[in-house]
Image (cartoon, grey):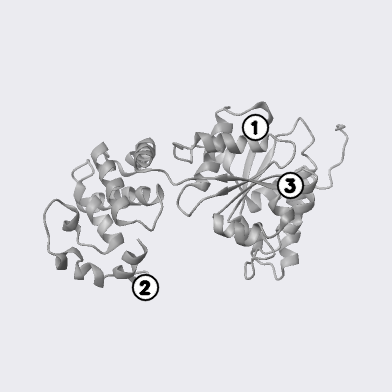
Amino acid sequence: MSKDYKYKISDEELENLLEKYCRNYTKMAEMGRFDKIVGRDTEIDQVMLILLQRNRKNACMLAPAGVGKTALVAGLAQAVVADRVPSYLKGAQIIELDMPAMAAGTNSPGEFQARFNPICRGIAERYHDPDLPRYVIFIDEIHTIMPTAKGSAYSGLSEVMKPYMTVGDLHILGATTLDEFRMYVAVDPAMDRRFQKVNLSMPTADETRQILRGIRPSYEKHHKLTIPDEMIDEVVKLTEEYMRKRSQPDKSIITMDAACAWHNMFRGKDRTLCIEAVYMMVAKETGMNPNAFSDNKMNTEEVYDPTINKVDIGGKNFNEAQDKA
């Protein structure tokens, strides 16, 4: 590309659009904003392999909520910052579209799409310049941009991307569940064939323990607590047994974080996370009596604490929470 080539979207305009409507994961990784990503090296390598291809270089991560789709994108950004990527991806800018910001103040789908088109065009027309970094556009809940997603404020945005994806001038990284991909994306053959699927399996209990141990320093620093291995083991054990409708590692991470917060509120003098805090937070999520998690035998009537069940959180009592846990 000649040096005097004039872009239709100027550098200043593109920079302003990216600043206004996107979040730059690469810059956040440089700032140390993300926890250490553990156990996703294979999936990150798979995404890199897709991005390196000449055709069909768009990846869509498929997994239930809470398994770690966004964390994988953070891991990719960390790999870029640490220079653990092929030369093609060195310095790559991984940006997430901020859909609510882009939709704010618009009165029609056309007006919303008009905000997105300059971003696509600006990135696409710089794709072939070897002196510029690659841009990877991350779209969470990518099924919401499909025309078939009736009721979505972002419906039809895929039609803006499609021409640029057809000629191979965009790298798109999407995330959604398998069911939603089948329901909304796969019904459009043109979009379906432009994506390669990356399936993220829910980590096992042992893998979840390794993930929690990997991110433990960040939580110890935030809460100013020591989190022993046995507390991590207990968190994983209890969430596996009593919160089966939710996914690992999300439910264990949330429980560990909440237990540390509870400990600081009620057992602040002791700087080591206690088992009582773990029991209390699992009880809070399930509506069960905290004593039911200990080795003490309890009557069936005592397992569910009527006092806890009467507590109302966000308009839903803990009986309802137990049904969803």
Judge whether 185 appears above or below 248 on screen.
below
The CA distance from mark 3 to mark 2 is 43 Å
**Which of the labelled discs sits on residue 91, or is there none?**
1
Three-letter residue code for mark 2: Gly
**Would you say residue 293 is visible in this rendering?**
yes
Check the picture and name the quadrant holding the C terminus.
Answer: bottom left
Task: Pick whichever, 44 or 194, lies toward us.
Answer: 194
3 or 1: mark nearer the eye: 1
Q: Quick one: label 1 or label 2, which is nearer the N terminus?
A: 1
SS for callout 3: helix
Mark with earlier residue (3, 1): 3
- Left or right placement of residue 303 versus residue 202 in this view: left
Is 92 located above or below residue 255 in the figure? above
Q: What's the amino acid at mark 3?
A: Leu
Using a 10 Å C-alpha cutoff, classify the residue at mark 3 as few (fewer than 14 neighbours), some (14 to 19) or many (20 or more). Answer: some
Q: Quadrant of residue 234?
A: top left
Distance from disc 3 to disc 1, alpha carbons, whole Å, reads 18 Å
Q: Is residue 143 left or right of residue 16?
A: left
Q: Position of residue 133 (x, y in %)?
A: 70, 34
- Classify the position of the N terminus by image quarter: top right
Picture quadrant where residue 185 is located: bottom right
Marks 1 and 2 close (CB-CB < 8 Å): no
Q: For the residues carrying marks 3 and 2, which lies nearer the camera in this image?
A: 2
Q: Position of residue 272 (x, y in %)?
A: 22, 41
Task: Name the residue type under label 1.
Answer: Gly
Q: Residue at 27% x, 55% y: name it.
A: 281
Label 2: which residue? 315
- Numbered label attached to residue 14: 3
